[in-house]
């Protein structure tokens, strides 16, 4: 890598596509309109479990403008899928309410929508089971949890250690189902031609959509092109293709017309994923000084009957704090519910709500400051693996946060600070997220006129990926950023990992650096003259990542919250939020700050508002829009600040960066719940922190 001081990495370069976005030039999936376009509107199951007996296609075809109505009875057959969710219209079974059972294609969106609403589907309904509970007879131990962690771990003798502990916390926490709800709903435009299929898709990973869809339609990956230059958020729900992508491709194939399919906000609540509800029991044993002797964390979660999605809820507990005896477990039950998926920091977000709430309860039981408790349990090496940390600056974050927040001199007594109608309190919690990096390819090209083009099938879901890759490329090429053009968002570009797992910058950045270095080497050999037609070099980081040294690599953070709770109504307002993070080198402070405060806002939203409520009778989540599913708005977040501590970690990647997309949400809900306890003396262990739970 280059050893000169970086000029762009670390600077606040504005978003390179900013002007395109504010002027409306940036095109999103639904805005692509190939010639001869038709519109597809899906039909969703109205039973939670059963058999589809018949669909009256002839009646649908009588509607004006209708071109086709496709269901199991007349759909083309697809190749088997690893993810049974994607075997759309391939079975007569209904696995959950809201599952796609048919699709109507028509000349206009209005025609398609009206006809879809008229479709009569005859079902043989069966009794459904949609309730997650810890005594469910169907609970089982999955082989592993996402993405590939052991399901259970155990060290020492946790039961004996708990029995012998001077102080024990034993508490059960629950988090509800939560739906991702990015600003831009999912949408796909599918067009077939002699070369195969083109998809304009709102996705976090064009290469993955290409490979998945190609396999379903029995084609080589090269016959599918996925175009996604701009994506309006995903938060995990666009990490892998959902059934609508297949439905759009199938409808286009069946009708011989390009087809546009937008998933409506209402439909999203069944078909584009959500965070599993969790029930978590945490037991902590400690000596009188607050040193942990045992940590036991057990999680209960759900998945659908057609696909196992096993969230890694207790995995962060394996690396957060030192304790000689420990156990973590996951149990899953397959219900007649939609399939959960990734939602911002899957695992860490609900898991750390439970662990960091329990730590607060332990601090109170020990009569210790909650920051001091965490300092006393700081491990020297990663607790369960014994690996050294590449860097771990949790304590630096807690200390810097305490200083900035004004933590010193805090009276720990709960329920005694009154300001007008409000009881006021403060809380703290730790944050963490693993540092992942996936193999990617990139190419870099020099033109005789001094311009460079870097190509990689990366995705910018609003994070600033295109901008930070421009910074990284410009520094490596030692060229002004204006002369470097980064092309992303198209599966015909060099294959790249998805925008997920907070690993985009690390994964793509490594490939971009290596491609740019290879280009410079090539130019050196040529005596720096760029021939007519340009010079191109490429890189593949598979080997570099496969052979990297083993370390425990994680980002850390500390979250501080001040809340006011109305003494009569229980209305909770977050008065201040402060997050201090240790995430390696920050590539772009401006876009990084947006990532952190965006995550923290989602954490506030999780703490106070977000809750998908299961309707046991109909077997479906009741909320289907923002009138019923509440998310935090600007007015809910009066004062929010994100900072970071300097962290120089040589064991990461050429940029020295850790991922920042997800850590902002982790720990926020616990900090707020801990502050609510400090304000009121009421411990809320079930999210969200609703009025009825405070005043009940
Ligand atoms: Mo993130 S939930 O890995 O897109």
Image (cartoon, rainbow, N blue to C red):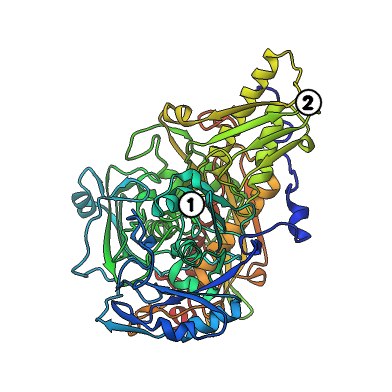
Image location (x, y in percent) of residue 649: 54, 31
Asked whether the beta carbons under mark 1 and mark 2 sit within 8 Å of each other, the answer is no
Instruction: State the residue at coordinates (79%, 38%).
Output: 482
The image shows residue 355, relative to residue 385, as above or below, that is below
Q: Secondary structure at mark 1?
A: helix
Q: Residue at x 38, y 38 (%)?
A: 382
Q: Is residue 656 above or below residue 289?
A: above
Position of 250 with respect to 188 (left or right) is: left
280 on left or right of 534:
left
Q: Is residue 413 visible?
A: no
Label annotation for residue 448: 2
State the image coordinates of residue 142 (x, y, percent, origin top left): 25, 54
Give 63 or 224, whichever is nearer the viewer.
63
Q: Is residue 60 above or below residue 661?
A: below
Residue indicated by mark 1: 209
Where does the image place residue 409, in percent across and percent down from the top left? 57, 56
Rendering quarter of residue 587: top right
Disc 1 crowd, CA 10 A, few/some/many (<14, 14-19, 20+) = many
Give coordinates of residue 186: x percent, y percent: 54, 64
The answer to whether one can see residue 490 in this image is yes
Residue extending furthest right? 449
Give the position of the N terminus as an image quadrant.
Answer: top right
């Amino acid at each position: 890598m280059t050893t000169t001081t970086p000029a762009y990495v670390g600077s606040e370069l504005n978003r390179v596509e900013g002007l395109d976005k504010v002027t409306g030039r940036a095109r999103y999936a639904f805005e692509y309109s190939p010639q001869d376009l038709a519109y597809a509107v899906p039909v969703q199951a109205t039973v939670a479990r059963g058999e589809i007996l018949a669909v009256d296609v002839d009646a649908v075809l009588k509607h004006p403008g209708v071109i086709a109505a496709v269901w199991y009875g007349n759909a083309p057959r697809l190749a088997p899928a690893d993810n049974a969710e994607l075997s759309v219209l391939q079975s007569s079974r209904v696995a959950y309410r809201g599952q796609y059972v048919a699709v109507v294609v028509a000349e206009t969106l209005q025609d398609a929508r009206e006809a879809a609403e008229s479709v009569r589907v005859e079902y043989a309904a069966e009794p459904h089971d949609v309730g997650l509970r810890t005594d469910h007879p169907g609970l089982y131990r999955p082989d592993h949890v996402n993405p590939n962690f052991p399901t259970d771990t155990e060290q020492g003798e946790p039961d004996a250690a708990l029995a012998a502990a001077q102080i024990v916390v034993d508490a059960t926490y629950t988090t509800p189902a939560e739906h991702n709800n990015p600003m831009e709903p999912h949408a796909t435009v599918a067009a077939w031609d002699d070369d195969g299929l083109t998809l304009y898709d709102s996705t976090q990973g064009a290469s993955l959509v290409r490979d998945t869809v190609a396999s379903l339609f029995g084609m080589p990956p090269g016959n599918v092109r996925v175009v996604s230059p701009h994506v309006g958020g995903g938060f995990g729900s666009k990490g892998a293709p959902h059934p609508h992508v297949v439905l759009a491709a199938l409808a286009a194939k069946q009708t011989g017309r390009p087809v546009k399919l937008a998933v409506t906000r209402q439909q999203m609540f069944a078909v584009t994923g959500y965070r599993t509800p969790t029930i978590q029991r945490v037991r902590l044993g400690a000596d009188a000084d607050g040193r942990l002797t045992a940590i036991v964390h057990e999680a209960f979660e759900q998945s659908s009957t057609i696909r196992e999605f096993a969230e890694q809820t207790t995995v962060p507990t394996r690396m957060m704090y030192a304790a000689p005896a420990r156990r973590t477990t996951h149990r899953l039950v397959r219900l007649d519910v939609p399939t959960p998926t990734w939602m911002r920091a899957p695992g860490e977000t609900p898991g750390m709500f439970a662990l960091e709430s329990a730590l607060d309860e332990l601090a109170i039981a020990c009569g210790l400051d909650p920051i001091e408790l965490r300092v006393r349990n700081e491990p020297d090496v990663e607790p369960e693996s014994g690996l050294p940390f590449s860097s771990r600056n949790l304590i630096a974050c807690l200390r810097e946060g305490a200083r900035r927040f004004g933590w010193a001199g805090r009276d720990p007594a709960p329920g005694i600070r009154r300001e007008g109608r409000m009881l006021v309190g403060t809380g703290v919690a730790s944050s963490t997220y693993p540092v992942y990096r996936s193999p990617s390819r990139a190419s870099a090209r020099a033109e005789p006129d001094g311009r460079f083009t870097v190509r990689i099938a990366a995705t910018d879901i609003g994070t600033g990926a295109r901008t930070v890759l421009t910074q990284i490329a410009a520094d490596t090429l030692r060229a002004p950023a204006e002369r470097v053009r980064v092309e992303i968002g198209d599966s015909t570009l060099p294959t790249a990992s998805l925008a997920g797992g907070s690993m985009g910058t690390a994964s793509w950045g490594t490939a971009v650096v290596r491609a740019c270095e290879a280009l410079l080497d090539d130019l050196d050999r040529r005596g720096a003259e760029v021939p007519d037609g340009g010079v191109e070099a490429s890189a593949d980081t598979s080997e570099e990542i496969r052979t990297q040294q083993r370390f425990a690599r994680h980002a850390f953070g500390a979250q501080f919250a001040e809340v006011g709770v109305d003494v009569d109504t229980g209305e909770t307002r977050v008065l201040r939020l402060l997050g201090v993070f240790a995430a390696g080198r920050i590539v772009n402070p401006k876009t990084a700050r947006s990532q952190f405060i965006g995550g923290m806002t989602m954490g506030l939203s999780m703490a106070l508002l977000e809750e998908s409520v299961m309707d046991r009778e109909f077997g479906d989540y009741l909320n289907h829009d923002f009138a019923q599913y509440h998310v935090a708005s600007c007015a809910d977040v009066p004062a929010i600040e994100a900072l970071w501590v300097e962290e120089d970690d040589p064991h990461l990647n050429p940029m020295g960066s850790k991922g920042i997309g997800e850590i902002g949400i982790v720990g926020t809900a616990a900090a707020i719940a801990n502050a609510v306890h400090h304000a009121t003396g009421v411990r809320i262990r079930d999210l969200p922190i609703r009025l009825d739970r405070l005043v009940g």
